[in-house]
Image: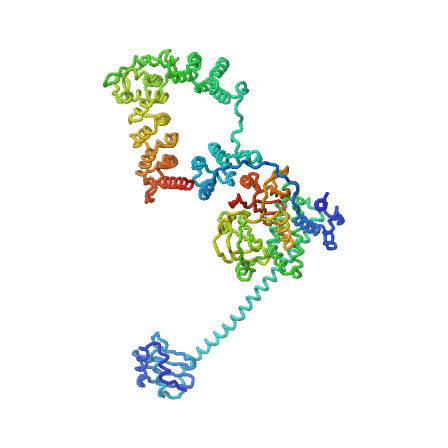
Amino acid sequence: MRWSEDQVLALAVDQASVRAARTQATAGKWPESGSTPDVVWGLCQGSGATPYQVCVELAEPAFRCSCPSRKFPCKHALGLLLRWSAGELADTVPPDWVEVWLAERAARAARAVKRAESVGTDDETRAEQAARRRAQRTDRVTAGAAELGEWLADQLRHGLARLETDGGQQLHAMAARMVDAQAPGLAAALRRTASLIGSGRDWPSQVLAELALIQLLVTATARLDELPGPLADTVRARLGFTVDTNDVLATGRRVTDRWLVLGRVDHVDEHLTSRRTWLRGKESGRVAVVRGFAPTGRPLDDSLPPGTTLTACLAHYPDGVRAVVAERVDHPRPAIGAPPGDSIDTALAGYATALAADPWCAHWPMLLTQVVPVRQRTGWVLADPAGQALPLDPDADPLALLAVAAGRPLTVAAEWSAAGLRPLSCWDDDRPVQL
Amino acid sequence: MTAWDELVRSAMLGTERQPLDETMLPEPVRAALPADAGLLAAAALLTGYRRAGVVALRGIANTDPPAPADPRPLVPALASARLGRMLLGDQAGLLPEWLAVVADRGLRVPPERLPALAEAARTRPALRPAVLAAAGPRGSWLADRSEDWALLLEPQDDQPEPDADSWRRGGVSRRRIWLTNLRGTDPAAARDLLAESWPTEPPANRQALLAALRTGLGPADEEFLEAALDDPDESVGRAAALLLARLPGSRLGQRMADRLAGLVTVTRRRLEVRLPAEYDAGLRRDGVQFDAPAGVGQRAWWLRQIVGTTPLSFWANLGTEPAELVRLKVTGQADAGTLHAGLAQAVAMWPERDWANALLATATIELTDQQLVVLINSLPADDRVRALAGPLIHGRLDKLADVLRELAKPWPAELGRVLLDQLDARAGQRGLVRIADVVARSVPPACFHHPITARLAAPGTSPWHQRVVETLLFRRAMYEELA
């Protein structure tokens, strides 16, 4: 079906092309030309010695001209089409050069289609590969954990006293194997245990507790598929499977609240410094921990100063405690006025609940109301008006808290662990104090 | 033994030797334990049981009375933040001043900063009084309850104060300290004790202990010291002579005046000087050194020492004012330098205003740093400014650092302004670090808006200049925050 003149000229890129097309549409310029139902072709005599080869594949349309013009379609192609539109082109077999061009086009098109199809299959492969890697890692971890379980049982048969002779060397060796098995959480736990050997009078008690919890993790790993979802997530986190922060921001459970920054604890390693900042929601009473990391010597993120409150939306990791700040509604402001805290019993119950969800939970924040530092024979304790008390961690420096309290009861935020309380912040009457 | 202790024992010995006895586990743990679970599983359960089941200590009574209330208001938050930065090292040298202003304005340091302050005072004993004042009644309360706190406030040198026993059995420096302390309360008793042990003391001891008599020196000491002039050891005799020279109205002073009378003639326009003809026994007895230092003529050296130990009343009796005297042309066997050096020594021993001003105003008189400090500090505030602002500054600004450091504070504002003008004018000069440092830390608050603080650092400005500006701005902010 031949096109109308208007349809042809509609292809022109500008008015100049239209004018030029008309001048090219005279028969005298075309020593050869012809058409088939699919393609229109011709040789156009331009200013040079050789005429330009011009052809148009009507389906798309696709233009080809050997002239140097950068316009697409050029004036020769338009002129040819105008002639065809006017019925001046005879129906003939195209010459070789047209066939060659058509064949090349077809080949290019086929290749493009093939590429498009193969991209689709590459996507699938990538997802498959990721799944395969996850499965591989799970297998390695499971195998590593099983090996660790055997090794632990062996140690217990022969007695832990042996560990003291090589200064924890064996534990470090097992830690290296756990790194190979892609279970950095198990490795870190073993190294922590090694550092306890021989330190202090009751190191056997501490080491047994740590090894017992490692064994518990081993057992949990073996039965990972049977565990309920949240517990399985906790186990994976303890093993060292990381969760991408972007995933947490995208899909993690969100809680918006007025959050009180209770305090933070830094752990300085040779290479890495890690920080845990404890938050407590004023409305929800929920506890959250935000983790930060930096190479040792570089500054850590300081956007959550202790003793301040801010309204924010936190996105939680699968374990339910660790979170990231998804959205800040306002800036941190000093928390003037002591917040309502807990009694010692309530605080201890809070830790017990946390332990029930995560048996490996070693630290938990407490916000204690009306407690005063009291000197005992064994060290300092924080005592409430009823005479109940919790011990301070002997390794934590109590001097600043002592100086602020000066014998008067006050509200104290502290981190609880098996070693005792580590003061994080307190309220000097209404004034928040970072310790 | 608790179940846990049993478990630990088994674990340490090994289950081959000491298998797990499940019956001693608490009922809830035993019930939850799977069959053939092993010791570690039991330990895991028991650990969870113990951690979750922590029970608070009971019956803890706080019978301790709280620290006495401190009615002073807290320093403002900005000032507290600045203190935090200073304790971490930022302009830590200004800590004494910050604490002084806080005490002056009746403010209180935030209690949580006290441990860090005490730590700073432990290594810098000069801070200790200021920190104790800042701690207030809380400080002693804390020291009574915490060894760490008490330790932080304890003096570095834990030698106890010398007591009566030290005199009989201590080393010579402890004995000297003890004797000096006694001279403060009972000079006669101290002298008597010294006189008693004198015959048996070795020369080095005698010279050291004699120095104690400088405290509470009085006419009653003259007999003892005159006798000491004849000590076989030359340095002991000289030490006694110097003490006698210091004693107003002493016979040694009179002897020196008599000698000088024979060597010096003052006319209206000239001062004619003769050098001592010989070094006789009298000169030696009265502590004049025989050997002159390098570059000084021997007899000139003797004259210098005579002038240096002659009471200033000698010159007054000659009828000349100090200001005139230093301007008189010196002729004869000695030059002005010798005479003026001797005068400087005398005036440094008995600073009198007219003499001090006269010496300081004469650019040609070379005063040692120590003499400069003594003279300047002896003057009233206005005179001090004039003395330093005079020809001294232009010549030896870089050498004034040590002098200025010893200068009594607060400095007159005029002095601060003049010195800052001088430093500002030499912004590109090198070698002024030390004096710049002293000036920046010592000028009074009235100087905090001196034009130098508005000066932007231009290329070629020395780093010390920038530090002066920084220090002044820091101090200015300090005072503003503590208002």
Q: Where is residue A339 in the image (x, y as percent from the top left)?
A: 55, 49
Residue A311: in sight, yes or no? yes
The answer to which image quadrant residue A286 occupies is bottom right
> Looking at the image, how many numbered discs can be counted on the residues?
0
The answer to which image quadrant residue B421 occupies is top left
Q: Which residue lies furthest to the left in this view?
A: B269
Q: In this view, does B152 lie above or below B199?
A: below
The answer to which image quadrant residue B164 occupies is top right
Residue A435: in sight, yes or no? no
Q: Where is residue A151 in the image (x, y as percent from the top left)?
A: 68, 52
Q: State left or right for residue B285 relative to residue A16.
A: right
- Of residues A82 and B329, which is closer to you in this image? B329
Residue at the (31%, 14%) spot, across then down = B260
Q: In this view, does B360 lie above or below A263?
A: above
Q: Position of residue A35 (x, y in %)?
A: 39, 86
- Of residues A58 and B450, which is closer to you in this image? B450
Colouring of the image: rainbow
Q: State left or right for residue B198 relative to residue B300.
A: right
Q: State left or right for residue B456 relative to residue A199.
A: left
Q: In this view, does A268 lie above or below B319?
A: below
